[in-house]
Amino acid sequence: MNVVDVLLWIVFPYIAVASFVIGHLLRYRYDKFGWTSRSSQIYESKLLRWGSPMFHYGILGVFAGHVVGLLVPREWMEFFGVSEHLYHLGATWIGTVVAFVTIAGLVILLSRRGAIRRVARVTSVMDVVMYLFLAGSLVLGTIAVVQFQVLGAGYDYRGSVSPWIRSLIFFQPDAALMAGVPLMFQLHVLCSTTLFLIWPYTRLVHVLSVPIGYLFRPYVVYRSRDAHRGARAVRRGWEPSDRPVPKRPKQKQPVRPGH
Amino acid sequence: MRVMAQMSMVMNLDKCIGCHTCSVTCKQVWTNRDGMEYAWFNNVETRPGLGYPRQYEDQERWKGGWVRNKRGRLKLKAGGRLKKLATIFANPTMPTIDDYYEPWTYDYDMLTNAPQTKNGPVARPKSLLTGKDMDITWSGNWDDNLGGSQETAHQDPILAHMSEHVKMEFENTFMFYLPRICEHCLNPSCVSACPSGAMYKREEDGIVLVDQDDCRGWRMCVPACPYKKVYFNHKTNKAEKCTLCYPLIEQGKPTICSETCVGRLRYLGLMLYDADRVLEAAAVENEHELLDAQRSVMLDPFDPAVIAQAKKDGIADDWIAAAQKSPIYKLISEYKVALPLHPEYRTMPMVWYIPPLSPVVDVISNSGNDGEDARTLFAAIDKLRIPVEYLAGLFTAGDTVPIEHSLKKLAAMRSYMRDINLGNEANENIARAVGMSGAEMEAMYRLLAIAKYEDRYVIPKAHVESARDLDEFACSLDTDGGPGMGGARSTGDVLATARIPGTPIDSTVESFASLKNLTDPSEPSTPGRLNLLNWNGGGISNGMFPPTAEAGGSA
């Protein structure tokens, strides 16, 4: 284990996580107005209707696969009756199919972004940087799976990469676990770590706004003008001085109707 | 019963001359920005016509509004909550900008900077989306005054429903104008479709707004609104819509579209309604009963029980008084001449329309008959199916009876007032034929024909105890590209600009009004003199001229 290993597999991931967390907090605090999915559907809908669901549902599958493969220890899986062989078959074949659907969706989306002039014109530099690392992570990960799991004899990342991730989570980082991992897996990890680093400064912030609350709230939302007045917080040093409250019966706030 | 107040509008379509002043002033105030070039919070459509965006009324295509399911409950036409979230990655009913029109500008620079040539230079249209030359093939108002209607009018969704027994003969056709803003519905489907909860209905006045900080650009509201009055800002990637000019309304002033309306056809006022009964009324089975159901949700502001409950629900006395004076209440509930636009969408819209009598009058006059005679008019309303059925398709879900009632009242008013204007004896029978008294006829005439400013707009100010705070209103829309577009915040000190160098010009509505009323400045540059910069131009003010010899003496 040398200095480079420590930098790549301990320092860099922690920097990326710190950037991810703090970046989101700052963005939410200071740039709520810029917090959007930046949908371009209004410019072009036909290609998007294929590419976007393919990519998004695919990437959700990819995320689920990574949770199972990286965060759940092998012993737990075996406790539930998932043997090494069964896991390997599932992860390899479901993973490969999901990866290709995701990549196909991304290819549709990216070619749409390049070919449709209206969409190309609203693509920012940060978008391009983000797409680079997003596509890079996807492609490198898929190559690694195809090279080692499908064509090769199979690489047991659950003995190296997964414990390394968990060692980071429990603040007992062990860079040695990553030192011997094949290059393709290493590149995939580095590329996606960079993606997490730049995440809060890109349009990817919309991932954190998954509107689950919509399932549970009443249809019609009511808000009071009084309660909402001055949507921005008062800046420090600019707080208004207290005014004496006039002696008159206080306005009762109407209860929010529960439709 | 839970009483809530709703700021509402009625438009008298007979008076609309289709000048588009409302649209233009609205655009200058609200949507004169990148990303909103294509959006018209207020637009004026020629009917029959396709409307803006094209064929927005075809809900089989756009899936806007609500539907009643088998269990008698309301469901969003585009699908329930789970379906909304499942289709969030590509909204299947989202209109593209081509359904509105591709915004463009002209290469004006060419006109002044072109080298000398044999032929004059031309300012070619350039797309604002791609920057390239483009052909203009559609716009927000392409079929204005039935222009090109031979080609397009058959695509009008309302005509499509009538086509079995109505032949569209262009020579014999009729037309009228339909100005449209956001309906500020009592049961808004756009608010209900917003996954982020960024859209809301204000408790105080029922205005439907989008919180620009909470909007995440999921764009479910755009197709969910059956009137297509929520727009996607393609620069900021957030939804925007008509705000009913709430900064003006809060100051007791009419919206910009109403203020600048040349035909004086817009009315603004409060309606009190029973919030507990909205859903029940919106879910009645028969579409033809929706009009009466919505009328029954409106409360009588003179009823002591309603007043008591309104006070209990936190509605201030001046607002109750304003609801009693409201022209909207008179037109919707007393005279019953105003009708909602497309009640069948079940959103309970609150911008209502008085259907136009002029297509009927025109037909009578053109045939050489007396267009102001009550009996001729009544007979024509019964006989002329085309305008009546078309209007029914717009305002009553196809039920012609309320349209006939409304038109007959307008016809009766015409002939009743003609007798009076000609010095004849007023014919009470005409009024009674439509179930009104002569006094009511005259009151309705004053409201509709004379239409004094203070009768048209009865708008109570936002509450006195909070009015001072409105000066310091920090608006979340005041961002680059946002509808507020930055600008100076009012300090309430309208003279600060003149007194303190470097103070930004105070440009809020509130300070404009106080500056306008300022005839006697408290701190002129020279005591006893008037600073002409603060003179409102109206008459002679103190200190404008030196005191006269008789009055002043030694000066």
Image (cartoon, coloured by chain):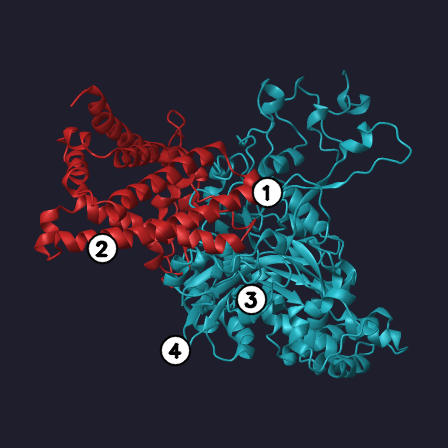
Chain colours: A red, B cyan
Q: Report whether mark 1 lies on the same chain as mark 4.
A: no
- The residue that mark 1 highlights is A117
Amino acid type indicated by mark 4: Arg
Secondary structure, mark 2, is helix
Chain ID of residue with mark 2: A
Q: Give the chain letter at badge 1.
A: A
* Number of numbered labels in the structure image: 4
On the same chain, marks 4 and 3? The answer is yes
Tag shown at residue B201: none
- Which chain hosts label 3? B
The residue tagged with tag 1: helix, strand or loop? helix
Mark 4 chain? B
**Above or below for A160 versus A3:** below
Amino acid type of the residue tagged 1 in the rendering: Arg
Q: Nearer the viewer, mark 4 or mark 2?
A: 2
Residue designated by label 2: A90
Give percent across and percent down for residue B34: 60, 39
Mark 4–mark 2 Cα distance, whole angstroms, equals: 43 Å
- Numbered label attached to residue B61: 3
Q: Position of B91 compared to B459: left or right?
A: left
Picture residue at 80% right of the left edge, 23% below the top? B548
Foreground: disc 1 or disc 3: 1
Q: CA distance from mark 3 to mark 2?
A: 41 Å
Image quadrant holding the N terminus of chain B, namely bottom left
Relative placement, left or right, of B334 versus B449 is: left
Residue A21: x, y in percent? 29, 34
In the picture of the structure, the residue carrying the numbered disc 4 is: B71
Secondary structure, mark 4, is loop
- Disc 2 packing (10 Å; few <14; some 14–19; many ≥20): few
Identify the residue shown where x is 51% and y is 80%. Answer: B286
Eye-nearest disc, 1 or 4: 1
